[in-house]
Image (tube, coloured by chain):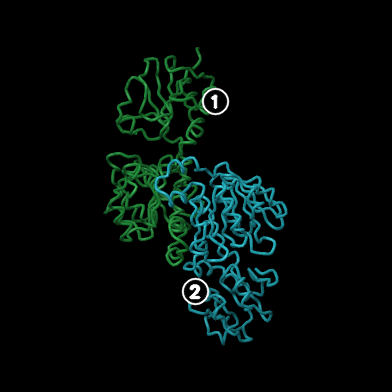
Chain colours: A green, B cyan
Amino acid sequence: MSTLRVAVEPAPDQHLASAIREVGGSVVPLAQAQVLVWIGGPDGFPDLPDTVEWVALSTAGIERFVDAGVLDDKRLWTNASGFYSRGVAEHALALLLGGTRQIVRSAKTRWAKDAVDPAVRTLRGSTVAIVGAGGIGRELTPLLKACGATVLAVNRSGRPVDGADVTVASDRTDEALAQSDHVVLAAPDTPETRHMMNDRTLALLRPHSWIVNVARGPLIDEAALHRALTAGVIGGAALDVTDPEPPADDHPLYDLDNVVITPHVANPTGRLTQEMAPYLAENLRRYVAGEELLAVVTADRGY
Amino acid sequence: MSTLRVAVEPAPDQHLASAIREVGGSVVPLAQAQVLVWIGGPDGFPDLPDTVEWVALSTAGIERFVDAGVLDDKRLWTNASGFYSRGVAEHALALLLGGTRQIVRSAKTRWAKDAVDPAVRTLRGSTVAIVGAGGIGRELTPLLKACGATVLAVNRSGRPVDGADVTVASDRTDEALAQSDHVVLAAPDTPETRHMMNDRTLALLRPHSWIVNVARGPLIDEAALHRALTAGVIGGAALDVTDPEPPADDHPLYDLDNVVITPHVANPTGRLTQEMAPYLAENLRRYVAGEELLAVVTADRGY
């Protein structure tokens, strides 16, 4: 059997090259490749020779590739869904604690003890809902449990998430929100999840509730969020994603002391291929063995 | 045997009253008390009748009481050292993650992706030194371990801290700093620890290192810290305490994007008696049983 021939485009990468060699493959130009590992965005995506049987994209979400018409049905496509879950979960914990322990408000003010002291909350004994509890939720759950929180997982199927105290199906999201102190959004952007946090659902939360979004901006109706934050309906918002990105520089959310927006860095670009490498190695091994790949894209679901 | 008579001053408190009744005691005016639970600061501390055999102060540090000459040797004094460790540990984790995940810089800027993205670090695989690893260190260790960090504990004796990967005695602090990615200060303020973080010791850290202080402001030479932060010697500082407190409103540390100062809220005033209540109940039980109390003050050590 000939050597596995893998192209890495649009630029070489040492972490991925090591992963390819680790499974006995070799890095080749695209014209000779069976597999293309594409570590760019949709711009500049190449015309593919028919020899390419599988394209491995390096992003967890692939909306932009779908919108750009890059995907075809001539070959297998994978994304990196789940490959960055651990890091994203850590970022979600950082955003949540940054809110509840008033790190955010403190960064935006100067020794505002009268405002900060009574607003500090502990996760111990609190209930945190993870809405869209897949890979990120599985990684976030033990972190929240270590902090003494009760974890209420919400996912499509309602199939129990390891370690979560309770898992419910997404048709019971309202109920979950009403029982939670804080909410972490980790759901994909689909027609069903678009603006799932709106005036009505934000009102199910509490005046001390922080909402964390490490998923996709469109899950939140930002005008409704701004209303809820200024009216004291919820305690604050810690967002890694917005709609659109970047937000306007004079976006009103920036002016609030109970809001932080990290610039879509839960999975930082600079660490991407390093985090992806072990998963690529595993998928190449599966490809050679004829096993089912991780993170196969189902284009009609949009993720 | 007569009922245990406990005064709670300078104001009544439901959480502490419940704790007192829970052990069969009753809340009485100071003139009739064997025990005074004092939930204020040194100002307005009353003249004590000779009948008071034990004063339970509600703060973890008692420097201000010592300075005000409140303590005497006619009776037993306790503070609340250790009673708030769990909450302080959570705050330390929030400060550390707020730094390493660039929540702080993001709160102070607007979608500064070029600065934030390359600066985001993960605790997974990092080494965190806890300097002064007592009660807070014991509570912080499992939180850091859950995030995948290696914990290097430093304490006076070098006696192993449960769960820490390595514990060393404080005469090896330099060595610990040189091996760490980040540092959490949790040591008491003593002549030995004063300005322990200075130009020399800060230089032992790394350009990505965050320093967290949940202990006492004087542990850090703030002028040296400012120099280290602006010169890129370390990555950032997340402080719950300063020297003095509050800092001047135009303190130069406030101007840096890699600094956050929370206004001494790791143990928030509003939650103090609720957190203290179970420990008071335990100490009252020990008092009645003639056992050694928790958190007895040794005035000559100043804490």
Q: Residue at x 64, y 81 (%)?
A: B53
Q: Which of B82 and A30 is in front in this view?
A: A30
In x, y percent, where is residue B31?
56, 87
Q: Which residue in the rendered view is the most extreme toward the top?
A: A1
Same chain for labels 1 and 2? Say yes or no: no
Q: Provide residue A152's location: percent of width, then percent of height.
A: 40, 50
With respect to residue A279, does B81 lie above or below? below
Give the class, few, some or many, for how many residues have Cα within 10 Å of label 2's Cα (few <14, many ≥20).
some
Total number of numbered discs in the rendering? 2
Q: Mark 2 lies on which chain?
A: B
Task: State which quarter of the image contains the C terminus of chain A.
Answer: top left
Residue topped by disc 1: A18
B221 with respect to A67 (left or right): right
Instruction: Describe the element under mark 2 as helix, strand or loop.
Output: helix
Disc assigned to residue B121: none
Q: Which mark is residue B18?
A: 2
